[in-house]
Image (spheres, rainbow, N blue to C red):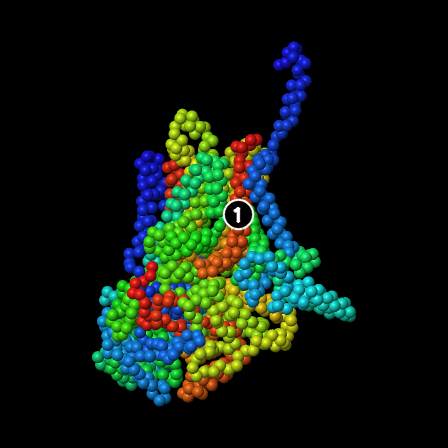
Amino acid sequence: MKELSGYLLRRFGWMLFTVWAVYTVSFVLMRLVPGNPFSSERTVPPAIERQLRARYNLDAPPIEQYTDYLVGILTRFDLGVSIRLEDYTVNEVLAEGFPVSASLAILALVFAITLGVTAGVISAVYRGTFADLSMMATAVLGIAIPNFVLASLAILLFVFMVPIFPAAGWGTLKQVMLPALCLGSPVAAYIARLTRAGMLEVLSKEHVRTAFAKGLPKRSVILRHVLPGALLPVVSYLGPATASVLTGSLVLEKIFALPGIGSHFIYAATQRDYTLAMGMVLTYTVLLFVMNTLVDVSYAIIDPRVKLE
Amino acid sequence: MPLELRRAFVILTLVMIAVAVVWATRFDAMPPAEFSLQNGTDPKTLDPHRATGSPESRILFNAFSGLLQMLPDGEPDPETGLQPMSAQPAVAKSYEVADDKLTYTFHLRDDAMWSDGTPITSRDFVWSWTRMLHPGTACEYNFQLFSLPNAQAFSTGVVEVGDRVEVELWDRPFPDGRREDEVGEANIQNFPRGTMLYGTLKEIRKPPEPDIDPEIDDNANADLMGQWQESWVYVVDIAEVEEDGPDTSVLWEEVVSTQTFCANPSSPIADEKTARIHNVLVAFDQLGALETPDDQTLIVHLKDPLPYFPSLTAYYPLFPVPKHCIEEYGMPMWTKPENIVSNGPYVVGLRRLRDRVRLVKNPRWFDADSVAIETIDALSTEGQNTALNMYETGQLDWVTDPPGALMETLRERDDFYAAPMLSLYFYRINTTRKPLDDPRIRRAIAMAINRTQIVEQVTKAGQVPAYSLVPPGIAGYQSPPGLEPDLDRAKALLAEAGYPGGRGIPKITILYNTSEGHRAIAEVIQQQLQNTLNIKLELQNMEWGSFLDKTNQIDYDIARAGWIADYADPNTFLDLWVTGGPQNSTGWSNPVFDGLIQQAAAETDARTRMELLAKAESIWIEEMPVIPVYFYVGINMVKPRVEGFFPSPQDIHPFQLLKTRDPESVR
Amino acid sequence: MMTEANSHDEPETLDRILKESRNIRGVSLWQDAWRRLRRNRAAMGSLIFLIGLALASIFTPLLPLQSPIDKDLNDRTFLPPSFEPVSMGSREGLKFQDNSLTAELNAFETSVAKARAEIAQLSSPAERIEQTVQLEQRIAVEHPFNQLWNQLGPVSFAMVRARVAIFGDFAMPSLFGTDKLGRDLLARVFWGSRVSLVVGVVATFVSLIIGVSYGAIAGYFGGVTDAIMMRIVDMLYSIPFIFVVIFLVTFLGEDSVKEVLDNYGIDQITIFYIIIGAIYWLTMSRVVRGQVLSLRQEQFVESARTVGASPMRIVFRHLVPNTLGVVIVYLTLTIPSVMLFEAFLSFLGLGVAPPDVSLGLLLNDGVEALSIVKLFWWVVVFPGAALALTLFALNFLGDGLRDALDPRMKNR
């Protein structure tokens, strides 16, 4: 217990450092890219632009902007006001969009893990059979098709040809299923392959053969002795899996008209909405960091031999 | 790992899943709206003085009402279905124009009120237009009121010795009652304003000017200049002010005292008696441009006899905004759905980012009885295919941006509306760069583009090839003969300019913002020029932000652009190109053209005015600072169960005229 | 030990033992792996497919394909797959002599030859040089190939010349149909695969160089150096790369920077490769670091150190080659990620610029053409199949390589 809390404390410290580093790099990157947030189809006269810059504290020297903003974040969790979406503070934008993206990501991951692990286990146990080969072929399909193509095909199939799901939008369980499915499929495919490989490796180990020889029922051997060890590569994949789910959601949120933070991401960058972009970057960073920490902790949970360092 | 911890971990996972499911279903707590439309990107703002795009305009035209409003006028065109519109009474029940066309008298309705019951008076309009022009508001449409005396000087913050000015002291009130000078902190809200003093500017004292280092970038230089301007000291003869109820009138000749003012209290030339101010501006609202003899009468004076002024009042930047609401909540918080007060047929009920803006019928609108639909959702759906899918499954009733690739099939449908719009798709040319500084080359390129192929094979929705600047359909105006697409002539011009057969011509790049439609058109033009003139154009796409910067800084060769008419008059297209105009961005300058535009603005006779504008347009066609490609077509798809929808020249569709045949919405 | 009594068996047993010993060869890792790989049918099939694909990509300009950029808007938009014969240069808008590419080419070359003859007649050498330069310029601009292909490099140009010489005006019919601007999809798939593959390979290669060096150094030196270097990697993992991509694409697209790069012969696509490579090296470095960490304890490292080899030499000469197995496996798995990432970027409009074409761009077009109103299935199915098959093959090959290089399966 003490070991765990010590570990978490150290990770928290690293997280703060990482967030600071990311903040600095992003700050520099965003200022270096040509362009300013006040471009629009109609040119803004210089006098007006000065007023706008003053309002958003963009006329202060960069160092001052840097420290002011940083202080604001650390003390008040105040990420500022969005420059493009005038009526909203960044916190409000995140508050509105985050639950959507998060629940989509969680459901996609849950789907991916469930489907992936099950398929992987079945494939490994019934290795070489038709079931195995067809599952692995489907899995490769999941990896080989970009998710926006998959989404378009899925819409054609499941919205129009066989009208099960609504076309777009957010609010009912039905509306979230198709996006979660499309988002989770590539991850499920990868997890299936990883599970299968892991299972095969553990299945050939001595202690498993002993367990079988002891006469234990097959199911219990697989679930209790084989699976935990086989899941290690899957668990360590969950970090990059989360990252890919979060980026994949960018595209899917556009296709399914979901009010999440994914599309804010792209538009904030392309429209030079400094404050919103910074908010996105920092959220994303914290999310990934937390996810990686969780992954490390789960590693330790699953494999008692691993120590948290 | 102790066992409890492992169990805790599993429980945590299950909890997260439950949370995810709850979040996923939480949104659907409200009943569906009666009518839904695709509104494109999220509206940037709901403040009429800060909005500029179509998604914002669709909401603003229906949430607010101006002096006049654009309503159908006359019979729709039998061929295209285009319904002509004109500015008709709204908040103003009638108006008169003086003979010299320089004075408008508006008579307001006495039952016009805000959605919270506060009555609307003529002073609301004065306050709103002042706010719209105020430099601190940074309204990008402020030039629309520049024909009012002193408006331009006020809006650009320019004051000269001898002007009658207003001075805003540094004591703006905060919401909690304290003032700036008490707190020591600036209030960035421009309204409510601090104490206002009025007088005549006697002198401006300036400290030594800072040196501008051309090495530093423009922003830093602008900041330096700005800081220097803030340290100027103004000497003003303060005049006496007479209060008469809500009206103040300034007795300019009665000088009470002479004081000095400065924006920066630590300026080197300020002394202890110099009062701290926000700004010194021309006293626009006290110099007679607008008069309010009583609550229901508004008199507007113009410098130029603009024939399209009534249309301007029907356009959203000139709509009134609620003073009491803005002064209470400040900008931009006053536009939040829980705070906003408006005066249109609908009010903003709900707003969710990247999801929708819900409009609810406003019972206090003066014509509320005629409004048929109770709730309207403006959905922020950008994907063209997504919108079409939602339309097909009944989630949307009105598509504003159908997929381009399917245009051929879609335009055969009954629910498809395409009608000419007062709008131009064009390619801006940087006339300061070789070889495009030579008008022969510009004309050659313009002639070599096969516009018919583009509108028939690429955009395919009935767009009209454009050989001149002003779209057809403006009553009383006849465009001069436009460019002739003559390939041989184009080749001859190219040879004349020194590049026979396209040899030796420097590389030219077409810049466009990332979008499927623009890419297709650019690629086709690239091929056309390769085939006909052997000029190899390069294509470069940029995302919106970078693209606009390049355009505004005139750092491109050819850049794609578009312009929709602000009002139904050729001037909205022509005055874009005056020397140094904010929308010019081409570096083109022609003093004869400028002179003609100014002359037309001052001309009272309608026929002569149109002739002057036509002459200006022919100069423009001759020099071709910009290549017109095609005139847009307003494209919409609307479900058959909806009545009261018609295509209009500016693509304005008043929601209060819409009716649905069945009261239930189809889900 | 043999007794005197069994001496008549000795020669046969000895022979037998000797024969057996000759069959047992010391196998190097690679030979052993290759043997195992050969037995994996899926992997071999993939390898053959990929080799075929590589050849097809290299020799694409030589193949009798239609033009990938020529748009025939009037007649050939959204045509379904068909066997209708086509002829090069037959489109009216091109205004080729006799509506044929070969005829136009002949006419062009005749006029060039005439011009050259005229130049040879000139008296002053300075003028001759000047005229030659102008002539070269003219050839570059007006050559008929410019109408049908985009910016052919010298090698591609030669290949296209050869193709015209061999096949004349013949071109394969639109077996994959045409797209919304009337361009032949078969040609576009081939040219697009070429670009996508190159992006994948080059970017992966860039990531390989950076990642392997970084990871090997971190793994070898261990301790504080390792901790710092890996922390940096952790942090870089958290930076949303989309910002980096936008930044780099915009920055390197600036005219001033572009001029400098043009002088070095680097164009936009090359930049693209480098940017993507710069994003993918992180995973590679982690993998290599893990591998090096375990290899560090091995004997051969110790002996190298004793002999006095410098750390750099140990890292690059001894450790890195031993990680190659893992690295190769990851290579074959990174290329698919890169290609998918390129498709993602194209969807957002940040990818390859037209008239160049890549599979990502094709898929983007394809998705547009899929709707319930009208289904132009060929626009998405063929590029999608091309991408999927390539990725399949890479994945199977990667799996096979991983199995083959697994040291535990040695000699099995």
Name the foreground residue: C276 vs A278: C276
Residue sitting farthest toward the left: B245
> Mark 1 — residue?
C391
Q: Can residue C324 be seen in this view?
A: no
Could you tell me which residue is drawn at 28 percent across and 68 percent down?
B361
Where is residue C407 shown, x and y percent of the image? 54, 34
Question: At which x and y percent is residue A171?
Answer: 33, 55
Q: Is residue A245 above or below residue C23?
A: below
Where residue A180 appears, as percent x and y from the top left, is: 39, 50
Decide which of C167, B443 is in the foreground and name it: C167
Q: Which residue is drawn at 38% across and 29% down?
A: A217
Q: Which amino acid does label 1 sit on?
A: Leu
Horizontally, residue C34 falls left or right of residue C108, namely left
Q: Quadrant of the C terminus of chain A?
A: top left
Farthest-out residue, bottom:
B99
For this view, does C252 lie left or right of residue A71?
Answer: right
**Up-down relation of residue B203 to residue A203 (above or below):** below
The x and y percentages for residue B552 are 47, 69
At 33% across and 86% down in the image, what residue appears?
B97
Mark 1 lies on a secondary structure that is helix
Task: Name the residue at 34% across, 43% down.
Answer: B13
| Quadrant, the N terminus of chain A | top left
Q: Which residue is at the far top?
A: C5
Q: Mark 1 lies on which chain?
A: C
Number of residue marks: 1
Circle 1 packing at 10 Å, graded few (<14), some (14-19), many (20+), is: many
Residue B134: name its quadrant: bottom left
* Residue A193 visible in the snapshot: yes
